[in-house]
Amino acid sequence: MSYDDAVRLDLGIRALHAFVTVIDEGHFARAALRLFVTAPALSQQIRRLEQQVGMKLIDREAHPVRPTAAGEALLPHAHRLLREAQQTALDLARFTRRQDRVLRLGFINGGPNSLTTSLLAQIQSPLELVQLQWHEQLSEVASGAVDAAFVRPPLPLLDGLTLEKVAVEPRVVMVHRGHRFAELPSVSIDDLDDEVHVSTDRAAPEWISYWAVDPRPSGRPVKWGPPVRTMDEQLQTVAAGLATAITAASLADYHSNPEVAYVPIEGIDPCSVELCTRTGDDHPGVLELRRVVADLQQTAP
């Protein structure tokens, strides 16, 4: 391929996304499900891309399918172009929100409590609320996908982000109603040493260890149980009696279930909710939210 041919080459973002997804999944049918297209349509899209570049990019005979040598050469460039396209879209969306004063605020399921929700009533800027996954609490703010987020530390702070404490509250253990702890006024953290705790692969290791208190003060490691990825999955796992889970006390108000009891824990530090924003962000809604949080801290006892 000559330099002039390369200049004229028009690699669409959609085609590159399809190519990367097939490689990620190693299977056309699974990739098609992710992309909400049929497998034959996806295969045709890849063939058109291969015709454009004049080279075979995917080895369809391999199981799982894998990139050819040409595909391997294209793959890092495809990832870079997709990242740049996504960042461009995020920057344009953020510019539009700033112009319209819309504050796109992220939260995790289990993040807000009564204090954080009362803060929102004081915000005059138009609000757009976005639920984040546990592992997205900081990255979505850093990328600009959201303008700010209420997060649950501890989290590995990314460059360019600022955290401001909003609220502090006790931690509790979620247990099945038939559990021997369910009717107790409280338990000590040592009482939980022999209990199975839910596990997850959707958060930073320090975040997982903090919420499960691993290792325990006794030095014993946590006994990990079924994996969960959302608060709803955690609630249902505990309701089924498959495991316990340590969480924030305010979740009892937002995630009730007749089969789940929330029991206070003695012997561990309380948890917090913090506001995460981009350092120096002059979005009007972000500035307003920071002022409300600062006023709260000044009036806190």
Image (cartoon, rainbow, N blue to C red):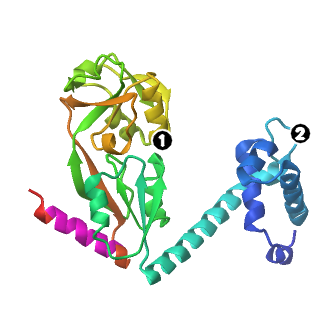
Out of 18 and 56, give the one closest to the viewer: 18
* Quadrant that contains the N terminus: bottom right
Q: Is residue 36 above or below residue 102?
A: above
Q: Residue 51's x, y, as percent?
A: 91, 62
Image-based side of 238 in relation to 9, left or right: left
At label 2, the amino acid type is: Glu
Q: Residue at x 38, y 41 (%)?
A: 255
Q: Residue at x 11, y 63 (%)?
A: 299
Q: Which mark is residue 230?
A: 1
- Residue 7 forms part of the magenta stretch: no
Q: Residue 234's x, y, as percent?
A: 45, 34
Q: Residue at x 45, y 30 (%)?
A: 199
Instruction: Give the mark toward the camera: 2 or 1.
Output: 1
Q: Which mark is residue 80?
A: none
Instruction: Check disc 2 and report the residue beneath it.
Output: 61
Q: Residue 249's x, y, as percent?
A: 27, 40
Q: Is residue 187 visible?
A: yes
* Quadrant that contains the C terminus: bottom left
- How crowded pointer 1 is (Cα within 10 Å; few <14, some 14-19, many 20+) is rated as some
Q: Which residues make up the magenta segment?
A: 286-297
Task: Provide the secondary structure element on which disc 1 rests.
Answer: loop
What secondary structure characterizes most of the magenta part? Answer: helix
Task: Provide the secondary structure element on which disc 2 rests.
Answer: loop
Q: Is residue 74 visible?
A: no
Image-based side of 62 in relation to 284, left or right: right
Image-based side of 201 in relation to 86, left or right: left
- Residue 287 forms part of the magenta stretch: yes
* Residue 49, image quadrant: bottom right
Label tally: 2
Q: Residue at x 48, y 49 (%)?
A: 133
At label 1, the amino acid type is: Thr
Out of 75 and 85, give the one closest to the viewer: 85
